[in-house]
């Protein structure tokens, strides 16, 4: 699963994942950019750039779906210009572990 959020929400997002049973994940800093007047729902309604994070985890399907539910509930309750975005991705292949 992949989660994208602004940096300021890192601790809250970590709690959302942990409460869903996603206890192992990686976090990386990223910078999100948005062109003025262009909005496809990815970034909030503000213009410019945002200091963001991406969280990445290999987890079981049940925990990933529960994390999405937590994220959706948080976004509905928080009413923010920078909603948390979560994605569950299928793994079609992987390198062999030795």
Image (cartoon, rainbow, N blue to C red):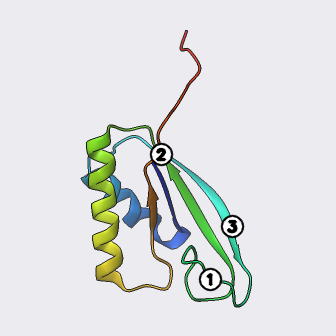
Residue to which mark 3 is pinned: 31
Residue to which mark 1 is pinned: 39
Residue 63 percent location from the top left of the image? 28, 45
Secondary structure of residue under mark 1: loop
- Which quadrant holds the C terminus? top right
Secondary structure of residue under mark 3: strand
Using the image, tell me which numbered label, if any, was put on residue 87: none
| Mark-to-mark CA distance, 1 and 3 | 17 Å
Secondary structure of residue under mark 2: loop
Residue 91 percent location from the top left of the image? 50, 34
Please report the residue visible at 53 percent of the width from the left and 14 percent of the height from the top: 97
Using the image, tell me which numbered label, if any, was put on residue 89: 2
Camera-near label (2 vs 3) is 2
- Depth check: give the residue in front, 66 or 7: 66
Q: Earlier in the sequence, mark 1 or mark 3?
A: 3
Residue 39 percent location from the top left of the image? 62, 83
């Amino acid at each position: 699963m992949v989660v994208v959020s602004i940096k300021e929400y890192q601790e809250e997002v970590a709690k959302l994942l942990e409460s869903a049973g996603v206890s192992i994940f990686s976090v990386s800093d990223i910078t999100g950019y948005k062109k003025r007047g262009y909005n496809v729902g990815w970034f909030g309604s503000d213009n410019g750039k945002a200091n963001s994070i991406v969280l990445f985890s290999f987890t079981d399907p049940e925990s990933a779906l529960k994390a999405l539910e937590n994220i959706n509930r948080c976004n509905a309750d928080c009413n923010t210009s920078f909603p948390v975005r979560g994605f569950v991705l299928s793994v079609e292949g992987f390198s062999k572990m030795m």
